[in-house]
Amino acid sequence: MSSPSAASPHTFHIPVMGTGFTVDTPVKVARWGISSVVSLVDDVLIEQMRRSLSAEHGEPCEPIDDHAEDARARRITEYLDLLDRLVSRQIARVRAAAFETGSDIVRYFEMLPPSPLRDLYGRMLNASGAARDRMQATLREAVVPGAIDVNIMTKLDRDRDRRGQPLPVHGSDALSALRGFMRSGLRSSVVLSAGMNRRLFTYMASFTDLLPDERGELRKRIILKVSDFRSALVQGKLLAKLGLHVSEFRVESGLNCGGHAFGGKGQLLGPILAEFRRERDNLADILHTLRRQALTALGHDAAGEPPPMRLTVQGGLGEHEEHELLRRVYDVDGTGWGSAFLLVPEVVNIDDASLARLEAAGERDIELSEASPLGVPFWSLRTSASETARLRRIALERPGSRCPKGYLVSNTEFTDQPICTASRAFQRRKLEQIGTADLTAPERREQQDAVLVKACICHDLAGGATGPRGIDPEARTAVCCGPNTAYFTRRATLQEMVDHIYGRVRLPLAADRPHMLLKELSLHVARLREDVRRWTSEPQDDLARSIAECSANLRDGVEHYRALASELVAGRREAFQERLEALQQEIAALVPPAVARGQLSYSRDGRSA
């Protein structure tokens, strides 16, 4: 039985977090109508989890060996179908439960946000006799699971296996992950993140479940995670020209998020969402026209209304007021709450030690580092077991990791086959090279630090799942929490977190927690400060232009937020405006006027021309 395609009754979702934190979250939350996202990066973990969950729930499980034909796709299909079966059984039990205190069906409706369905539940509680029975029957039919969505990082797309052998046609990581999802019985969405992959886009068009059936419906849908409107337009048009519909644009803050951070040029969430609000209908019309032309060429009936196109946003949410502000002011259909749920052990996989470290973490314990072998800034917990193990290996003069999975291999500086920059094999060779180079002591130390900072994230991000389940008792968990996690001071239950999101209760937050939009602005200011520092020590035209563009975008964002302040509740408005003015002054003081005006020019040696 496949999960139905009915929309979630909730106005929030739980985004993908690492590889292991949300790998089985649907089994924990989908029965309550809450949608969540499973990463498809690590098929080794997925196979381990399939075996563990199958044993736990009495399901048959035929192991799929690493080198079996199409092993990655098959593992993913089997695992997703297992999740689907387990959730379907849970939903059947919820629907069959009695409407009595503490039952599953009562919990289902009590977690809902204000809505007509929640109102019907309230009326049922006060009804009696035949009217009560009719309302209960209607409510039972309305129980639907949250979506079991999947995430594909489009840039992780190896063409060779762990032995260095070329993979077959359509056998690359991203394509085989897509194939695994498409062959599953799920009726849900694939979330595409980390940019554009034309080969993947083209391959998607070969699957009929992403194209309309005879009723014009889609069995499977596409969610595009984007950083700004231009990205949505460019990628949306490419997909539309293949006959593919983007069912949801999921806007994520460039810096105020967990995991990899794609900061952009000072583009802030508020102005980005304002552009979506202005251009949303136009975007839908453009994409519908292109898609209709493509479908006609493919022989599909392209008449009728286009499928709906949702807009959601995620990155740094921490309070009910922020959730409501984004929905009210920018007309988003929903929000994503990620890092906050790392403190809800009912929902994610996290070992007790990592959870305790998160509870104790302050702002300085969560850093935007260069740890990722992808070369993209990466948010991580400095006190994590993975980070502690990395520093211990360095102290023992054995830096680098074993690289047991190899999903991030990309470097061929010393080897014919790509290896990972976090691996022991790479770091040993690179440090030897630096040691014999003609460098000053500070230059040598800087280059060594740039090598040693790389961490094994594709294996260690699974530790929260593999450690507690006994799959890998020696796991050293990496925690990819966003900066917002520092403001949540204790663990919470699922009910508490849902009630916090909807404003029914208020979880304790750090007193100095800034508004999510101002936190993002301050992160961009910090990045601008670092760019100005680099420019001061080594002036370059490209960097000067980047600083000028970034500062201009930040100034525009400040003006946007100054107008937005009137939408905030009294009492918070004044603090918001005060912090906004302070950040504006900091931006003005940071950027030299000539650079801000774009009037400087430098020759190749960095001197003023």
Image (spheres, helix red, strand yellow):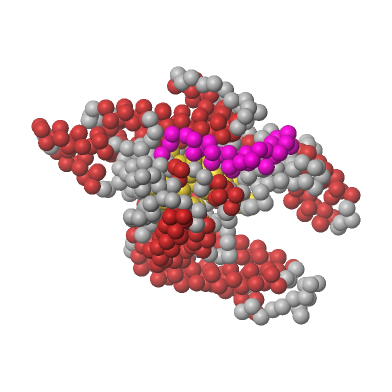
In the rendered image, residue 104, in percent from the top left (x then y), is placed at 30, 30
48 in relation to 486, above or below:
above
In the rendered image, residue 426, in percent from the top left (x then y), is placed at 78, 42
Q: Is residue 335 visible?
A: no
At a point 40% along the width and 47% down the height, the residue shown is: 212
What is the chief secondary structure element of the magenta stretch? loop
In the rendered image, residue 350, in percent from the top left (x then y), is placed at 52, 34
225 in relation to 426, above or below:
below
Question: Left of 521 or right of it: where is 32?
Answer: left
In the rendered image, residue 590, in percent from the top left (x then y), is placed at 61, 71
**Which is nearer the eye, 214 or 111?**
214
**Where, by quadrant of the figure, is residue 526 drawn?**
bottom right
At a point 39% along the width and 44% down the height, the residue shown is: 213
605 in relation to 515, above or below:
below
Residue 344 located within the stretch drawn in magenta: no
Q: Is residue 179 visible?
A: yes
**Which is nearer the eye, 262 or 2?**
2
Q: Quadrant of the C terminus?
A: bottom right
Question: Left of 17 or right of it: where is 433?
Answer: right
Residue 161 located within the stretch drawn in magenta: yes
The magenta-colored residue range is 159-187
Question: Left of 283 or right of it: where is 377?
Answer: right
At a point 36% along the width and 27% down the height, the residue shown is: 89
**Where, by quadrant of the figure, is residue 598 drawn?**
bottom right
Report the number of discs: 0
Task: Name the residue furthest left.
Answer: 129
At a point 23% along the width and 37% down the height, the residue shown is: 139
**Which is nearer the eye, 300 or 400?**
300
Question: Left of 9 or right of it: where is 265?
Answer: right
Q: Quadrant of the N terminus?
A: top left
